[in-house]
Each structure stands twice: as C-alpha cells, then as structure tokens.
C-alpha cells in the first residue's frame, strides 16, 4: 500500500515537473501572492485604511516580479535599492498629483529613463519597472502630500514583506532550480518516449495525431534543455560540472529525437525526412504501421516502456530486475545482440541502445555514480566510454564565440525602445485624458506593457491584441464578481490573491489569460476603493484599446523595426551560428584539432529560439498574410532540421578522442566545405536581397568521399551515421534556397 502511495506521489511529482519545469511559475505565483498577503495582513494589523492596503499590495506585487536576477546576493542588493526608488517615485507622484501639466511631463520623462534602464541589465530593468509602477500606484490610490508619510510606510512594509517571502518563506537557490529543471527534463523525456510508444502502434487513422504529439513533446523537451543550459553557470559547483551536464542533456535530447525518426522510418517504406519531425502538419510517411504480431515488433513494444522506466526510476532504488533491463537495452549497441528483423527495425533497436547509453550518462552526471554490481560487459563498456568522455570534457577549454556588432545611439535596442515608449505614452496621456481626467493612466500602463519583451512592430501588435482580448473578458468577469462580493473586503482581497497567483502562473503560457486575471483583480480592487461601476470597467476597455493603439502607432512610426527586418536579422544570426557549428564539427571529424562545440551548439539553439519568438506575428492565426505565414513556418522547420543534424555531428565529433569506433576521415573536410559555403550563400542573400551567390548542388556526400572511379569505401555504422547527418544537413540547407529565393547551380552548369 505504501509502495503504491509512493508511486502515486512520484507520478504526480513528475506530472507537475513536466507541466511547470523547475516549478518556476509556481514559485512566481506563490511569492507574489504571498508577499501581497503578508503586506495586507501587517498593514491591517497596524490599522491602515483600505487605500493603503491596496497601495501596499500592488507595491509588493511589483517588487516581487520585477527582480529577475538568479543570485540571491544580487537579488538582495536590488531589493534594497528598490526601497529608495519606490519612495522617491511615490513622493513625486503625490506632490505632482495636483499639478497636471508638470505631472504629465514628469511621467513621460520617468517612462523614458525607466525603459532606458534596461540597457544596464536585470537590475536596471527591475528598478525602472518599480519606479514606473509605484508612480502608477500613486495615481491609482490618489496619493496626496498629507497622506504621503503613511503611504511611504505602506511601501516600506511591502518591500520588507517581499524580502521576507523571497529569502525566508519561499527561498529559491540556483542549485535548487537546476535540480527541479533536471526532474522536469526527466519527466518530459519520459513523456516523449510514451508518445513514441503511441506512434509505434498507431494505425493509419491515428498516426497523424500521434506524430503531432511527438512533435509537441520534442519541442517541450528542447525548451527544458534550453532552460537548463541557461542556469548551469549559477546552479553548478564549477565550470567543468556545468559543461558535463550540458553535454549529457544534449546527448539525451539528440538520442530521443533520433529514436523518433527511426521509428518513423520503420513505419514507412523509405527513410523518413527529419523535416517531418519539425514541420507542423507534415504528413506521416507512407507505408502503413507496425500493428503486426512479430517477435521483433513485440520486442519494441517491450523495450520502449523499459527505456522509459530507466528514465523515471529513482537512482536510490537498487533492483536486479532494473539492472537486467538496463543491460539488455545497452546490449543493442552490439550487432550480435540485435534481433533478426528488417534493417529499419534493427535501426530502432540500435536507437534504443544509444538512448539507454545517453540516459545512463545523464543520470551519472546529475545524480553521481550508479550501482555497478550487476553490470553486463556491454554496460561496463558504456560506463568506460562515458568516463573517458567525462575526463575529456573536464579538460576542454571554453571557446570564445565571435561577438555581435555593438550598436550605439538610436540603433541600440534599449534607446530605441525608450524613445518609442515615451512617444507612445505621451500620446496615451493626451488621448487618455480626453476619455477620463481621472483614469487616463490605464492607457499609459497598456502602452508601457505592450513594449515589454517585444522587439518589432508585429510583436507589439500581437501583444496589444492579446491584452485587449484579455481585458474585455476580464471586464465581464469583474462585473460578475463585483456583484457577488459586494462590500465583503476580505473576500475581495482573497479573490485578488487568487487572481494574482493565476496571473503569474499563466503568464508564460498565455498573455491573454494573464490580462484576463489582471483585469478581474482590478475590478475587485475598484470595489475595495468604492469606485466600482460598470462605466469604470468599460472605461478600462477603452483606455486599454487606446494604449495598445498608441503603442502600435509609436512602434510603426518612431524608429520602426518592421517584423520582416527583425526576422531577417535573426535569420542571418541563426545561419551564422549554424555555419560555425557545422564547420567546427566537420573540421574535428576530419582530423582537425579538438574544439569545444558545446557553447557553439548552445548559441545556435538560442539563435533559433529568438527566431521562433520573432516570427510569431507572422505565424499567428490572425495574420492575414497566409503565404508568409506558411513560408515562415517552413523556413523555421528547415532550420530546426539543420540544427538537429548539426548538433548530432557536434556530438559525434566530441566523441572522437575517446570513442574507439569513431575515426577521423580527412575526406569529410571537402564535403563539409560545400555545406558551409552554401550556408554562406544563404546568409549573403538574407543580408543583401540583391546578392546572387548561388547554392551549389551536386553529388551526394558519400559520392564526394569516393572521387573518380575509386571503389567506394566501406563505412562502419558510426561513420554511416556521420554521412547520413551530413547528407540530411546538405539537403536541408539546399532546401532553404527556394523559400529564401537563392539561385541554385551544380558543377555541371559551370
């Protein structure tokens, strides 16, 4: 019974970890709602009026979510600096509240410097945000000079409660976050394997749905891998450990993705294209399914769940049965242990063996030495390979990537955003006061918010649309809740806390949902301040629409960054990073000096993540440009395909010094040069639309390695995999020529 309870708790923990990697959203929601609760409790015990409770609660919320630094010491310094910033902003708001023209002018200046502060990193961003929001609070509660001392006390209490919640009640350390992200990666890896099990047995009618689930699970696993990589430097004891974990996470991700590709190939009549795993809506390869009674297929139905068990099983649990499962799966790395089956099915077994090795390496890196008492020779050999790789990784030197051009003046993104927000806010103030001389600041707040974490006109337009939609829905909820709550102050505060928690828990998932909860909470705050009415909530919608429109207008007219330009810049960066990874990996596989490829691969992943975010306005369902939407999705999918093969080549290149079955081949250098040159042609076209440098097509990569009439060399299984990755990378790079309008040529044309 107890074992079943523990198993149930473990499944629930894994489910939560997969849904909220690192519990980052849960922590954000608990901290923010908890800070507000503590603030309201302390102020109510001190006999503060409702306006002070509201001011303290909003200040606590802002001081909690504004601070994004990872180190606790830096968080403490920023929080300490937040108090004088907040008090100064509140005091100026109270003094200037009755001086409309001067107050408006100061608000515009404050907005400029608050946004400009983003160039000074997380601390500048946090202090600028706190300064702006506390000035907004002074307008919201109608602060006056006479009420200033008690309001300053409320703000000080809020900052103190925020510190107590952050450092004592819900403390978070970088190592703890990394540990929870590790659990999330494990849970999402298990979910991907479960999706692959469903794909294995999916019939023709269910195959498309099963493949879509595999794509989604691949994306979620990659997202978690990026989150882990972003926190390795703070969450690990030293650089060597960080690099080891980074390598093992990348290995596990590549092995799992490759296993899915092999399953797709085994289902069809020909080798599956990697693009199928990355392009939404791509059809399932033709050829049927594996819904047959066959010993080899039945073995896959047994071994895929077994691999998932290896991922999920706690390291502390020692089991002879589990050791036998691990030994069997790792044994598939040896040809003599493969069952008699079609070559494509045997490839799936090999993929399971490589995935089991990746899981073993990941668990060793994250959890320390594992029990070796029941190891088979195949498992012992895998451990020895991993130990040799660990030693090589520990001795590698960090590579310094080529730095990007440093922008200055109005070309600097922070300066440009500061000017845009300032102009948009000035327009919002003017228009907002025409709608209401009392609540014009809602338009300014919306204009400010739509610029947060956006870099192009399209992104601002989409964010403004989502905020307006969430506000309209929130107004409807606010009308219903205000009628239900009435004059019950503590019921209203309790609901506000629930909505604040929901706001921060859903923020990374849906900006519309976050806006809904914000507006619903504000409706309750209006009730507490006895200023609630239907006309007030409708005015909120009007001010929100005005603020969004002012933000979009400023972004489109003042130093605009069109979505096309933004995506082209990021596309060029992604292509440069792809060329760097490919060139370095091929050079090492050709016998060149060993180089660290981890940072290059991470830089490529980040460039792709930035590009995916930037093309969202083009791929949004509301976008009227259907052709561009389809083209953007296709280009991103092709780039993700290229990145997968480049990462795989990099992973095998790093195995070269320690893996006995991989040997350098100087002939790869020429084949790799064609790929890198083609990526350069794509980059030139992206940078200059008049460029006519062609992409060169020609013989397959394998043919390039056997020039003239020489007999084609006999390749081993690992070398075959290198050739397949090079070939698929070459095809994907050439495939990018059509959507990017790059001419193609072949040696015969010359």
Image (cartoon, rainbow, N blue to C red):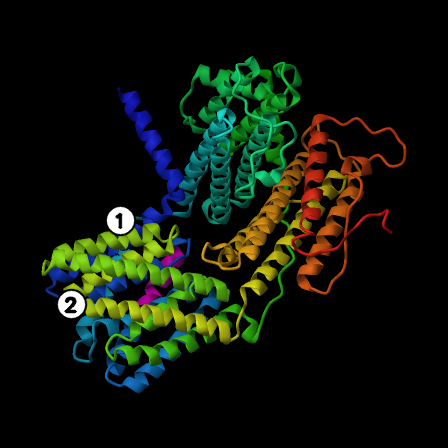
Are the residues tagged 1 and 2 within 8 Å (C-beta)? no
Q: Position of residue 552 (x, y in %)?
A: 44, 70
Q: Is residue 333 visible?
A: no
Give the mark toward the camera: 1 or 2.
2
Report the number of numbered marks. 2
Q: Is residue 263 visible?
A: yes
Mark 1: secondary structure: helix
N-terminal of the two: label 1 or label 2? 1
**Above or below — where is 32 with respect to 698?**
below
Residue 82 magenta-drawn? yes
Q: Position of residue 439 (x, y in %)?
A: 25, 74
Q: Position of residue 635 (x, y in %)?
A: 60, 51
Query: What residue is drawn where x is 64% and y is 27%?
Result: 269
State the separation of the CA atoms marked 1 and 2.
Answer: 30 Å
Mark 2, residues whose alpha carbon is within 10 Å: few (<14), some, or many (≥20)? some
Q: Position of residue 220 (x, y in %)?
A: 47, 42
Query: What residue is drawn where x is 38% and y is 39%?
Result: 17
Q: Which residues are magenta?
A: 73-85
User: In the picture provided, is 664 more to the left or to the right than 533?
Assistant: right
Residue that mark 1 sits on = 169
Q: Quadrant of residue 93?
A: bottom left
For the stretch drawn in magenta, the main secondary structure is helix
Q: Which mark is residue 529?
A: 2
Mark 1, residues whose alpha carbon is within 10 Å: few (<14), some, or many (≥20)? some
Q: Residue furthest right?
A: 709
Mark 2: secondary structure: loop
Closer-to-camera residue (292/49): 292
């Amino acid at each position: 019974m107890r074992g079943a309870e523990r198993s149930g708790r473990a499944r629930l923990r894994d489910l939560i970890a997969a849904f909220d990697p690192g519990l980052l959203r849960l922590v954000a929601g608990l901290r923010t709602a908890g800070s507000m609760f503590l603030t309201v409790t302390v102020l109510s015990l001190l006999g503060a009026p409702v306006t002070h409770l509201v001011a303290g609660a909003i200040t606590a919320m802002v001081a909690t979510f504004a601070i994004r630094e990872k180190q606790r010491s830096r968080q403490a310094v920023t929080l300490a600096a937040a108090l004088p910033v907040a008090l100064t902003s509140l005091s100026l708001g109270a003094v200037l509240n009755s001086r409309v023209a001067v107050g408006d002018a100061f608000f515009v200046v404050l907005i400029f410097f608050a946004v400009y502060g983003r160039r000074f990193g997380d601390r500048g961003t946090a202090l600028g945000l706190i300064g702006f929001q506390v000035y907004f609070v002074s307008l919201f509660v109608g602060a006056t000079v006479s009420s200033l001392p008690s309001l300053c006390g409320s703000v000080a209490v809020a900052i103190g409660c925020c510190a107590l919640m952050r450092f004592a009640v819900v403390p978070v350390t970088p190592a703890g976050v990394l540990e929870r992200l590790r659990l999330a990666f494990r849970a999402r890896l298990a979910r991907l394997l479960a999706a692959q099990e469903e794909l294995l047995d999916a019939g023709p009618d269910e195959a498309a749905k099963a493949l879509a689930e595999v794509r989604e699970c691949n994306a979620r696993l990659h997202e978690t891998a990026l989150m882990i990589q972003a926190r390795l430097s703070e969450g690990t004891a030293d650089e060597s450990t960080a690099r080891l974990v980074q390598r093992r996470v990348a290995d596990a991700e590549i092995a799992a993705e490759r296993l899915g590709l092999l399953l797709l190939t085994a289902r069809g009549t020909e080798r599956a294209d990697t693009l199928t795993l990355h392009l939404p809506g791509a059809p399932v390869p033709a050829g049927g399914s594996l819904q047959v009674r066959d010993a080899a297929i039945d073995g896959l139905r047994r071994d895929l769940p077994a691999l998932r068990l290896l991922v999920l099983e706690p390291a502390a649990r020692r089991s002879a049965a589990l050791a036998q499962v691990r030994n069997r799966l790792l044994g598939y790395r040896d040809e003599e242990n493969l069952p008699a089956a079609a070559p494509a099915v045997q490839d799936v077994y090999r993929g399971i063996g490589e995935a089991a090795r990746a899981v073993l390496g990941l668990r060793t890196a994250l959890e320390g030495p594992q029990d070796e008492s029941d190891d088979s020779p195949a498992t012992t050999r895998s451990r020895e390979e991993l130990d040799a790789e660990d030693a090589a990784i520990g001795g590698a030197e960090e590579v310094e990537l080529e730095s990007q051009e440093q922008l200055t003046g109005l070309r600097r993104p922070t300066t440009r955003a500061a000017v845009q927000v300032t102009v948009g806010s000035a327009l919002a103030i003017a228009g907002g006061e025409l709608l209401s001389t009392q609540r014009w600041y809602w338009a300014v707040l919306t204009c400010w918010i739509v610029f947060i974490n956006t870099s192009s006109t399209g992104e601002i337009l989409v964010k403004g649309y989502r905020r307006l939609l969430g506000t309209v829905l929130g107004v409807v909820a606010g009308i219903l809740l205000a009628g239900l709550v009435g004059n019950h102050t503590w019921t209203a505060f309790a609901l506000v806390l629930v909505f604040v928690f929901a706001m921060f828990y859903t923020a990374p998932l849906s900006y519309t949902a976050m806006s809904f909860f914000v507006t619903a909470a504000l409706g309750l705050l209006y009730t507490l301040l006895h200023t609630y009415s239907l006309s007030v909530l409708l005015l909120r919608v009007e001010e929100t629409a005005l603020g969004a429109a002012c933000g979009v207008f400023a972004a489109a007219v003042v130093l605009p960054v069109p979505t096309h330009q933004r995506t082209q810049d990021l596309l060029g960066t992604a292509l440069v990073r792809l060329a760097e990874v490919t060139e370095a990996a091929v050079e090492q596989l050709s016998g060149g000096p060993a180089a660290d490829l981890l940072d290059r691969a991470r830089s490529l992943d980040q460039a792709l993540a930035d590009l995916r975010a930037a093309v969202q306005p083009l791929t949004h369902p509301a976008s009227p440009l259907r052709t561009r939407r389809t083209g953007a999705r296709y280009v991103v999918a092709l780039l993700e395909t290229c990145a997968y093969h480049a990462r795989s080549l990099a992973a095998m290149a790093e195995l070269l010094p320690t893996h006995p079955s991989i040997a350098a081949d100087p002939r790869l250098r020429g084949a790799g040069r064609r790929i890198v040159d083609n990526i350069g042609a794509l980059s030139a076209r992206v940078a200059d639309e008049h460029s006519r440098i062609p992409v060169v097509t020609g013989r397959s990569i394998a043919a390039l390695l056997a020039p003239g009439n020489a007999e084609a060399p006999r390749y081993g299984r690992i070398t075959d995999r290198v050739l397949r990755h090079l070939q698929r990378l070459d095809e994907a790079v050439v495939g990018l020529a059509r959507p990017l309008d790059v001419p193609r040529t072949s040696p015969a044309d010359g």
